[in-house]
């Protein structure tokens, strides 16, 4: 499922504090997804996420379509974080891409959660993508 995946480019910036804060902010959002609380995950996402998806009904359909075939989550481990300022194709601002190596009942996937720093300094989800590992 490609909801929104930011192109971070080849040049890696570094902001350990931002990356850690964004990583921590992914945890409650992913917990909502894991519990099937897709409507709550919609409400907890950034306005830009909601604008790009279109409607809560579209999000519910995409989330169910993506998550149901995976079965139960067995484990999730942080693989990497990448910080970027003003990535191409996104509104100006600070972003962190958080990638997890996740094992599910039906296979292994890479979960990518794109986070955007908000005006109040909080980090909110602007994208979610899953990809089957080979």
Image (cartoon, rainbow, N blue to C red):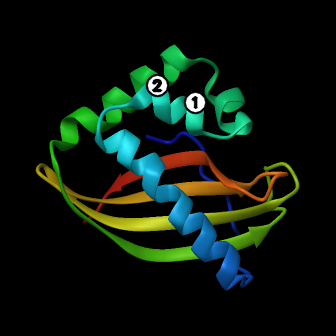
Secondary structure beneath disc 2? Answer: helix
Q: Is residue 24 above or below residue 118?
A: below
Tell me: 87 left or right of 131.
right
For disc 1, the marked residue is: 43
The answer to whether mark 2 and mark 1 are in CB contact below 8 A is yes
Please provide percent x and percent y for residue 56: 54, 19
Taking depth in this image into account, of 20 and 134 the one nearest to the observer is 20
Instruction: Residue at the far right: name it.
Output: 92
At which x and y percent is residue 81? 55, 74
Where does residue 46 sit, x and y in percent of width and height? 68, 40
Question: Residue 39: which numbered mark, if any?
Answer: 2
Residue furthest toward the front?
Answer: 120
* Measured Cα–Cα span from mark 2 to mark 1: 6 Å
Q: Is residue 104 above or below residue 80?
A: above
11 vs 43: above or below:
below
Residue at image location 68% in from the left, 31% down from the top: 52
How far across and down, in percent of the image, does residue 73 sit? 20, 52
Residue extending furthest left? Answer: 105
Task: Please name the residue shown 65% across and 66% down the image.
Answer: 96
Image quadrant holding the C terminus, namely bottom left
The image quarter containing residue 42 is top right
Dot 1 falls on a residue whose secondary structure is helix
- Residue 30 left/right relative to 34: right
Residue drawn at x 46%, y 25% is 39
Q: Nearer the viewer, residue 24 or 62?
A: 24
Name the foreground residue: 131 vs 114.
114
**Crowdedness near tag 1: few (<14), some (14–19) or many (≥20) residues, C-alpha within 10 Å:** few
Q: Residues within 10 Å of mark 2 (few under 14, many from 20)?
A: some
């Amino acid at each position: 499922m490609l909801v929104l995946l930011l192109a971070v480019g080849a040049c890696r910036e570094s902001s350990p504090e931002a990356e850690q804060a964004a990583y921590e902010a992914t945890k409650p959002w992913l917990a909502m997804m894991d519990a099937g609380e897709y409507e709550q995950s919609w409400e907890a996402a950034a306005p830009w996420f909601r604008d790009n998806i279109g409607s809560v009904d579209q999000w519910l359909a995409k989330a169910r379509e993506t998550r149901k075939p995976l079965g139960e989550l067995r484990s999730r481990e942080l693989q990497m974080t990448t910080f970027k300022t003003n990535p191409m194709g996104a509104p100006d601002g600070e972003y962190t891409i958080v990638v997890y190596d996740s094992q599910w009942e039906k296979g292994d996937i890479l979960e990518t959660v794109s986070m955007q720093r908000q005006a109040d300094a909080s980090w909110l989800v602007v994208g979610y993508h899953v990809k089957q590992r080979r």
